[in-house]
């Protein structure tokens, strides 16, 4: 059995930050959770991360800002965006920028796993 | 008094009477009566019965019988009478004549016929006509004589008086002096009245004193003692008679007691006078002229005969004196006339006009001094028809012709002509000629007055010139042409002058040539463009100093050397220049009026007066022309502005219906500008739906109110124009209301407004949707986070419980988190609710009428756009309520909009809206909005105030529900009722007074039925 893939989560909402890693661990992923983009970049987990679950609206560096930063650092981590805003126009923009997916909270378990599968397949 | 002579005394009549009796014993009968048949006693009886004097004598001439009348007259016995040649029977002067005739008759038997005086018993002599008739027998022998005596005293006296009266009157007429006439009268009286002395005294012109009249036979000392005595009752009998205007008789001065004060009687007695009869002499009108007095040297009382005589004398005296006096006053008048002729002459010469007179043939025979002085020609030169030489040659023929026809017509007439003055100049005169006629209507003379009307003529001509020039100014003639006319006019008025007019250029730095039609072109060119400096020439100097500059002789002139103006002027033949500034009404110099002469010349006062007139005319012309130009310009600007802004202007006199439109107004209405504007004409264009608006407008105008309307026109091609009209009423000086207004074609604006309005409402919808969306998003965002957490936790929990072995610990943890996230979501909702709570009511004092007025003002244009006629009946003294002004205004606005919307489909009646405020029962205030819209059915009324109920195709039905909430929050009531006619009435009534409105929390109450929805609606409303 291979080492579980490292999934990193960046979200400023406490509920998400607490609940999502537990769920992903149940599916066998290794999860590192961060409450801000800056924290993630400074963690040393960047290169090990196989998939990044990233909130769009973040204090400080936003989700898209982090995406741009990672591209600049040539750390091409597959990203699944999640957002609480029900703005349908956001998703195409995010996909265009190279996101694996853009999901609206609350996200169903199945949808999330499907997105993670696609992300990890990219690798 | 001649008539007063007793007719019975007439001898012939007596004789006739004797004959007519048919008695045979007629004394005139030549046949002797039959004495034997009639006894002597009988004969005697007959003789005595004869009313005449009869005496018989024997053939020898001895007197035999005297009838009774004879005896009574003489008062003597027959014997005394028979010796008639002595004893003072016949007046001594007449006796010789009588004796001679008697003797001759006796001797020859021939009858005699003679007049002589006989002495009456009282000593008075009377004239008698005596005839002696012989009685013969058949053989012819004289048997006896009959003497018939007839008293002819009265007749003679009458004759004599008449003769003397005539003599005296002839004297009066002959211009004899009054004293000579009165002397004659006195002489006549004394000759008539035997033994008398006569005097006449006159009353002086003051009526207070006696003055000398005549007293030829009285002593001069007596006369002088009487003259000068005052006219009163005390100074003497004549004075008294004159004073009392009645006769004063003093029969014996020795016994007289009157006039003592003046000691008149002793004075008269001293002159040997014993009696005095003074009789007043009165004029025909009863005025006392003097007194006529007869004196005797013995005491004497006037007899009736005396009185008759006196009356006759005084009558003659009165005539003489009166005639004399009128003669006197006539001659005095004549004298005065002569004097006044002298005065008249002086007056005539003093008359400022020229006076003349001519004979009936028109030949002038009198010329006043003024006439001669003016023309320098005297009567010798100008008399007859010589005056015509002094006429202006151009007027001579016309005037002499007119004079000839005037003479022919004999009517008075007037002419105007110029007369040459002594110095050769001519002046206009008005000649008036009037004929003087005698009583038969024949013209005796012509009188004439020539009045100098030169000044008037000149003023007339100046006025006419001014009028002509102003007419040209008004008709838009170019200024240059007008000023040239003025120059010509000046040159025609002021002989041998040359005139020019210069203008100050708009920059006020140079002179501009304007007119100088008779001056050399070179000269005009040289002056044109001269700088406005003192040294450039007289005209520039006049402008700079704003005063007249006179160069009386340019050859002697030292000024303007720098610009060599004088040599230039002299080279053009000009020797004198008078430059006068032309000032505008505000005092600015706008030009120069210059007069030039070819010889040296200084202006006379007359010249100055004319210059004053001319510069005045020039100033008017220039100012009017410039003003006219400015006006034309500004009119053009206005017209262009009107055209560009699609704004027409109009004036409307309501009383007369007179409407004036600007050109653009015609263009807007698309009417021919030649049409007269009437309300009917306007009405024919107004959109049928807007006719009520127009009627409303007319009603407003008639009430004298200003008005502002938006209405539509329906053009002939069916297109619609939107007009915005504003009119302001002014009351003119005669109290008539006149509206001045503007009407603007706002079709494009209205169309774009409509487009905008549509866009706006779309935007409003978008905004509402957007804001709802935003709120929803916000709600979603806040709720989605905990929801995601809940979902995640629930999944994890399920997975942990389903694991083998189940992770109970982990499941419990995730279940706890799920619970926490659920509470979190609930908190989000609570927070949002708190957000809406920020709409707090403000309690303030609100005048509902005032609040309503503001809302009306805000909605007026919307209402007008919907062609709603609004009537405000807002009470001016409404008690204030305490509440939220803005919320209440939102309710009012809502009611107005609902009313307006309810009428939008109404086309068959005026869309009338009434907003009214009034006090309501129970210390409340009520506001009512009444429309004539689609109305309500009773079923609808129940649902009306429920949220989301609406009768409108658009809208959410929120307004009335919120309105009711707001009113209820103010402890008031909002209700609706159908009208008896079309439409509905919405009213609310709220209590007044402090504390009436509840505070912040009350909104919870309001919101209770459908809190969230209402909150959302009010949220939305605020964003629109």
Image (spheres, rainbow, N blue to C red):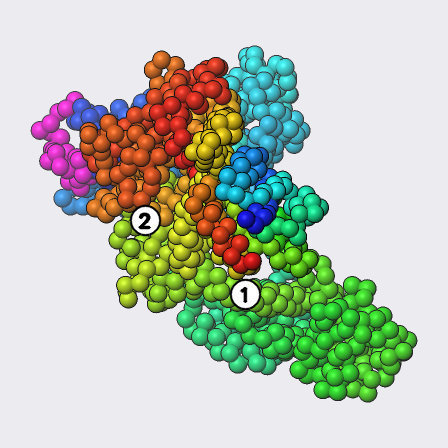
Q: Quadrant of the C terminus of chain B?
A: top left
Q: Where is residue B223 in the image (x, y as percent from the top left)?
A: 63, 30
Place residue B132 in its image quadrant: top left
- Please name the predominant secondary structure of the magenta segment in the image: loop
Q: In the shown orientation, is residue B116 left or right of residue B626?
A: left
Dot 2, how many residues are within 10 Å of its Cα: few (below 14), some (14-19), or many (20+)?
A: some
Q: Foreground residue, B387 or A33?
A: A33
Q: Which of the chains bears the disc numbered 2?
A: B
Q: Position of residue B632 (x, y in %)?
A: 54, 67
Q: In the shown orientation, is residue B100 left or right of residue B265?
A: left
- Residue occupying the point 52% across, 43% down: A28
Give the distance between the C-alpha atoms of the residues marked 1 and 2, in whole angstroms.
31 Å
Q: Foreground residue, B480 or B305?
A: B480
Place residue B529 in its image quadrant: bottom right
Q: Which range is magenta?
A: B16-42
Say whether residue B17 is magenta: yes
Q: Which of the chains bears the disc numbered 1?
A: B
Q: Position of residue B456 (x, y in %)?
A: 59, 64
- Helix, strand or loop at disc 1? helix
Q: Foreground residue, B421 or A87?
A: A87
Residue B637, disc? 1
- Residue occupying the point 53% across, 37% down: A22
Q: Mark 2 points at which residue?
A: B694
- The relative height of residue A106 versus residue B564 in the rendered view (above or below) is above
- Residue occupying the point 43% across, 63% down: B664
Query: Would you say the residues marked 1 and 2 are in contact, meaning their CB atoms lie under 8 Å apart?
Result: no
Dot 1, how many residues are within 10 Å of its Cα: few (below 14), some (14-19), or many (20+)?
A: few
Place residue A14 in its image quadrant: top right
- Residue occupying the point 49% across, 21% down: B1000
Give the mark nearest the N terminus, 1 or 2: 1
């Amino acid at each position: 059995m291979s080492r579980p893939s490292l999934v990193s989560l960046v979200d400023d909402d406490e509920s998400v930050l607490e609940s999502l890693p537990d769920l992903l661990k149940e599916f066998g992923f290794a999860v590192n959770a961060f409450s801000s983009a800056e924290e993630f970049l400074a963690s040393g987990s960047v290169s090990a991360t196989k998939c990044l679950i990233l909130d769009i609206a973040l204090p400080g560096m936003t989700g898209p800002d982090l995406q741009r930063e990672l591209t600049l650092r040539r750390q091409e981590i597959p990203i699944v965006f999640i957002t609480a805003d029900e703005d349908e126009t956001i998703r195409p923009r995010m996909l265009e920028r190279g996101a694996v997916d853009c999901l609206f909270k609350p996200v169903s378990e199945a949808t999330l796993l499907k997105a993670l599968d696609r992300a990890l397949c990219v690798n | 008094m001649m008539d007063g002579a007793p007719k019975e005394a007439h001898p012939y009549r007596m004789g006739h009477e004797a004959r007519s009796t048919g008695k045979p014993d007629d004394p005139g009968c030549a046949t002797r009566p039959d004495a034997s048949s009639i006894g002597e006693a009988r004969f005697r009886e007959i003789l005595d019965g004869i009313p005449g004097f009869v005496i018989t004598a024997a053939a020898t001439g001895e007197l035999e019988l005297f009838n009774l009348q004879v005896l009574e007259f003489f008062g003597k016995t027959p014997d005394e009478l028979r010796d008639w040649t002595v004893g003072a029977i016949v007046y001594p002067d007449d006796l010789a004549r009588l004796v001679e005739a008697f003797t001759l008759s006796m001797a020859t038997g021939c009858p005699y016929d003679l007049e002589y005086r006989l002495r009456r018993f009282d000593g008075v002599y009377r004239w008698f006509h005596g005839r002696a008739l012989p009685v013969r027998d058949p053989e012819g022998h004289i048997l006896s004589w009959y003497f018939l005596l007839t008293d002819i005293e009265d007749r003679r006296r009458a004759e004599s008086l008449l003769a003397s009266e005539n003599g005296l009157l002839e004297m009066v007429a002959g211009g004899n002096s009054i004293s000579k006439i009165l002397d004659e009268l006195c002489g006549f009286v004394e000759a008539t009245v035997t033994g008398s002395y006569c005097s006449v005294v006159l009353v002086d012109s003051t009526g207070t004193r006696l003055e000398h009249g005549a007293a030829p036979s009285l002593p001069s000392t007596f006369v002088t003692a009487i003259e000068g005595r005052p006219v009163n009752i005390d100074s003497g009998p004549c004075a008294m008679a004159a004073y009392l205007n009645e006769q004063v008789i003093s029969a014996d001065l020795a016994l007289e007691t009157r006039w003592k004060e003046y000691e008149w009687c002793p004075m008269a007695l001293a002159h040997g006078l014993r009696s005095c009869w003074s009789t007043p002499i009165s004029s025909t009108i009863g005025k006392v002229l003097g007194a006529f007095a007869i004196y005797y040297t013995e005491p004497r009382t006037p007899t009736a005969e005396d009185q008759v005589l006196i009356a006759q004398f005084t009558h003659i005296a009165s005539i003489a004196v009166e005639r004399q006096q009128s003669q006197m006053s006539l001659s005095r008048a004549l004298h005065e006339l002569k004097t006044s002729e002298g005065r008249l002459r002086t007056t005539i010469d003093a008359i400022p006009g020229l006076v003349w007179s001519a004979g009936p043939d028109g030949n002038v025979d009198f010329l006043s001094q003024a006439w001669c002085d003016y023309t320098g020609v005297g009567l010798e030169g100008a008399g007859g028809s010589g005056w015509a030489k002094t006429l202006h040659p151009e007027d001579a023929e016309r005037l002499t012709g007119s004079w000839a026809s005037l003479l022919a017509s004999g009517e008075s007439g007037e002419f105007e002509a110029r007369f040459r003055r002594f110095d050769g100049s001519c002046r206009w005169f008005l000649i008036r000629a009037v004929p003087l006629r005698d009583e038969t209507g024949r013209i005796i003379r012509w009188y004439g007055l020539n009045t100098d009307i030169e000044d008037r003529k000149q003023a007339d001509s100046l006025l006419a010139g001014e009028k002509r020039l102003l007419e040209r100014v008004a008709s838009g003639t170019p200024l240059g042409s007008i000023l040239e006319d003025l120059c010509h006019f000046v040159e025609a008025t002021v002989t041998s002058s040359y005139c020019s007019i210069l203008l100050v250029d708009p920059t006020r730095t140079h002179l501009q040539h304007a007119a100088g039609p008779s001056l050399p072109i070179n000269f005009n060119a040289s002056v044109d463009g001269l700088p406005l400096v003192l040294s450039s020439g007289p005209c520039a100097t006049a402008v700079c100093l704003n005063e007249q500059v006179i160069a009386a002789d340019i050859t002697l002139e030292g000024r303007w050397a720098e610009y060599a103006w004088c040599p230039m002027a002299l080279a053009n033949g000009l020797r004198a220049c008078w430059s006068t500034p032309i000032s505008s009404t505000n005092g600015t110099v706008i030009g120069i009026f210059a007069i030039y002469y070819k010889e040296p010349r200084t202006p006379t006062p007359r010249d100055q007066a004319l210059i004053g007139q001319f510069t005045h005319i020039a100033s008017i012309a220039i100012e009017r022309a410039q003003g006219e130009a400015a006006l034309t310009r500004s009119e053009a600007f206005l017209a262009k502005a009107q055209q560009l802004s699609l704004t027409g202007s109009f004036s409307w006199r309501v009383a007369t219906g007179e409407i004036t439109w600007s050109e653009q107004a015609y263009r807007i209405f698309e009417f021919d500008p030649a049409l007269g504007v009437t309300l009917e004409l306007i009405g024919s264009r107004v959109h049928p739906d807007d006719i009520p608006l127009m009627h409303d407008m007319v009603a407003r105008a008639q009430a004298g109110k200003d008005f502002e309307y938006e209405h539509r026109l329906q053009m002939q091609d069916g297109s619609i124009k939107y007009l915005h009209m504003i009119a302001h009423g002014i009351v003119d000086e005669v109290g008539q209301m006149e509206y001045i207004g503007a009407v603007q074609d706002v079709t494009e604006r209205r169309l774009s407004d409509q487009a905008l309005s549509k866009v706006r409402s779309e935007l409003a919808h978008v905004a509402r949707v957007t804001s709802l969306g935003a709120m929803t998003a916000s709600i979603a965002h806040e709720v989605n986070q905990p929801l995601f957490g809940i979902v995640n936790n629930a999944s994890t929990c399920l997975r942990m419980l389903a694991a083998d072995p189940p992770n109970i610990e982990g499941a419990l943890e995730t279940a706890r988190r799920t619970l926490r996230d659920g509470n979190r979501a609930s908190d989000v909702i609570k927070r949002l609710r708190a957000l809406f709570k920020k709409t707090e009511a403000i309690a303030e004092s609100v005048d509902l009428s005032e609040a309503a007025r503001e809302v009306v003002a805000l909605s007026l244009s919307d209402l007008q756009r919907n062609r709603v006629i609004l009537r405000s009946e807002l009470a001016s003294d409404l008690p204030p309520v305490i509440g939220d002004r803005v919320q209440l205004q939102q309710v009012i606005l809502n009611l107005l909009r609902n009313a307006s919307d309810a009428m939008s489909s109404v086309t068959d009646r005026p869309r009338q809206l009434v907003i009214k405020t009034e006090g309501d029962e129970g210390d409340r205030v009520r506001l009512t909005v009444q429309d004539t819209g689609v109305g309500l059915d009773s079923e609808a009324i129940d649902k009306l105030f429920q949220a989301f109920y609406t009768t409108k195709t658009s809208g959410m039905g929120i307004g009335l529900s919120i309105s009711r909430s707001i009113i209820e929050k103010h402890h008031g009531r909002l209700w609706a009722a159908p009208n008896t006619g079309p439409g509905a009435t919405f009213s609310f009534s709220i209590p007044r007074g402090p504390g009436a409105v509840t505070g912040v929390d009350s909104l919870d109450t309001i919101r209770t039925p459908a809190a969230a929805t209402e909150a959302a609606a009010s949220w939305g409303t605020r964003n629109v």
